[in-house]
Image (cartoon, rainbow, N blue to C red):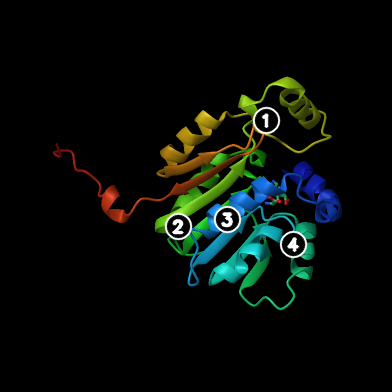
Amino acid sequence: MTRSLGFWNFMAPRYARQTVSDQPSYAYKLAQTQALMHRDMNVLEFGCGTGSTALTHAPHVGQITGIDYSPKMIDIARSKLGDSTNVHFETATLDGWTAPDASYDMIMGMNILHLLTDHKAALKRAYTLLKPNGYLVTSTACLGDMGGIVKHLLPIGSTLRLLPYVAQFTCDALEADFASAGFEVRQSWRPGEGRATFHICQKPSEASFVPRGPDAV
Ligand SMILES: C[S@@+](CC[C@H](N)C(=O)[O-])C[C@H]1O[C@@H](n2cnc3c(N)ncnc32)[C@H](O)[C@@H]1O
């Protein structure tokens, strides 16, 4: 974790200068997400990086909070705030983020789940923080599905401490993890071979989760 944090702090200024490599796919993901948004939504984005996505969505929601464990990323995100009054950026991890249960209408995790050593714990935390019917929106590199050299180079780079930790789950395994955490997968979209998969998941309404007693049929 500390080694990966050093990597992301180091990367922050470079990350801020990068342009989005696949603009049409990014625009599609933004549009699909905004189609679910409304002006009184409370939104959390974890692993927000330099804040571009949160700032883009801000005019479509009530409040949006971006958190990232890299203080360098958060410094850059805050420097881009401008006149936005409904966006806040804080240095934090999702598991360390203290907010009341069921306080968010949407939680976003873009290009982050595969970087966590325990993404299943993050999904459970997101579930707890979401209101019933709330949305979890993610974009995730499912390395387990990727062929070619990338699949092997990333873990080697990670073992050699040149790159941050990267998990190797498949998209099917990730979707099973969404379901185990209690989510229903509403959309799964991958722009092409070897690309990150975009997921929209939903926490069911409370009625769907009425606990069944031992005598229930
Ligand atoms: C690939 S960048 C994605 C940033 C942004 N979401 C985007 O799509 O451009 C991953 C971000 O996750 C953060 N991150 C990586 N590992 C993390 C961890 N274990 N806990 C919290 N944040 C982490 C990094 O600091 C970095 O800003």
Tell me the CA gap for discs 4 and 3.
Answer: 25 Å
Crowding at label 1, few (<14), some or many (≥20) Cα neighbours within 10 Å? some
Q: Quadrant of the N terminus?
A: top right
Q: Position of residue 21 (x, y in %)?
A: 76, 45
Residue 29 got which mark?
Answer: none
In the picture of the structure, the residue carrying the numbered disc 1 is 194
Q: Is residue 151 above or below residue 131?
A: above
Tell me the CA gap for discs 2 and 3.
Answer: 21 Å
| Amino acid type, residue under disc 3 in the picture | Ala
Crowding at label 3, few (<14), some or many (≥20) Cα neighbours within 10 Å? few
In the picture of the structure, the residue carrying the numbered disc 2 is 130
**Left or right of 133: which side holds 187?**
right
Residue at the (81%, 47%) spot, across then down = 6
Instruction: Give the number of the mark in front: 2 or 1.
Output: 1
Crowding at label 4, few (<14), some or many (≥20) Cα neighbours within 10 Å? many
- Mark 3 lies on a secondary structure that is helix
Sequence order check, earlier mark of 2 and 4: 4
Tell me the CA gap for discs 2 and 4.
Answer: 23 Å
Instruction: Give the number of the mark in front: 1 or 3.
Output: 3
Sequence order check, earlier mark of 1 and 4: 4
Tell me the CA gap for discs 2 and 1.
Answer: 30 Å
Residue at the (66%, 49%) spot, across then down = 26
Residue 213 occupies which quadrant of the picture? top left
Circle 1/circle 3 CB separation < 8 Å: no
Instruction: Give the number of the mark in front: 2 or 3.
Output: 3
Sequence order check, earlier mark of 2 and 1: 2
Residue 108 occupies which quadrant of the picture? bottom right
In the picture of the structure, the residue carrying the numbered disc 3 is 31
Residue 74 got which mark?
Answer: 4
| Amino acid type, residue under disc 1 in the picture | Gly
Sequence order check, earlier mark of 4 and 3: 3
| Amino acid type, residue under disc 4 in the picture | Ile
